[in-house]
Amino acid sequence: MSSDVLSATERKMARAVEAMERDFQGLRTGRASTSLVDRLVVEYYGTPTPLNQLAGISVPEAHQIVIQPWDRGVLGAIEKAIQKSDIGLMPNVDGAVVRLNIPPLTEERRRDIVKSVHKRMEEARVEIRNLRREANDAIRKEERDGDLGTDAAHKEIETLQKVTDRFVAEVDAAGAHKEHEVMEV
């Protein structure tokens, strides 16, 4: 039973790290990336729709994103969605496409982005620790109920701590990589 607890906890911890890495993709790093606008939600005829389902998104140059909607009638809605978002870019509507020019990041802006990276890393660590606590409680409960011996419970808890340490190290490594990427000029 407790091996089920460990494997389920390990899967949840892996998902926590993956979610953090997905969030990191949406952070500006000074160069254009389609992931900056992929998850923007656009009001498409009254229905909130992800931008990547309404348009082709490409990066023709290192500092430019081009959004080419399949329906020209949605250009205004895409422009409004970009302006309302927190990516801090002004859209240029050019006939049938929307162009986003990515200006170089200032030192102050880079530091702000690094702060948000650290905040997101801490959120992931807290989530991992909470998952560890829940699994720890489940193992202790199995021990109290007699489903698991004392030695086996201690082994399971040690294994759980090793798994937790591994995922916290993954969070730290991903955060350090993103911080380096952001601070790179």
Image (cartoon, rainbow, N blue to C red):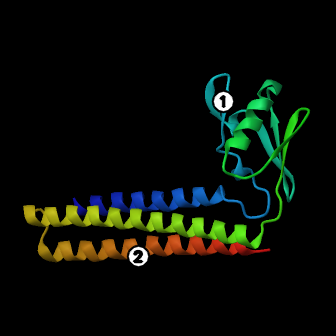
The residue wearing badge 2 is 165
User: What whole-number distance in Å separates the C-alpha atoms at marks 1 and 2?
Assistant: 43 Å
Q: Residue at x 71, y 71 (%)?
A: 108
Q: Is residue 152 above or below residue 85?
A: below
Left or right of residue 22: residue 97: right
Secondary element under disc 1, as helix, strand or loop, is strand
Q: Is residue 15 above or below residue 43?
A: below
The residue wearing badge 1 is 43
The image shows residue 32 at horizontal and vertical percentages of 79, 57
Left or right of residue 135: residue 14: right
Task: Please name the amino acid that badge 1 sits on.
Answer: Glu
Q: Residue at x 83, y 60 (%)?
A: 103
* Mark 1 touches mark 2? (CB < 8 Å): no
Q: Name the quadrant of the N terminus.
A: bottom left
The image shows residue 98 at horizontal and vertical percentages of 84, 40
Q: Nearer the viewer, residue 37 or 153?
A: 37
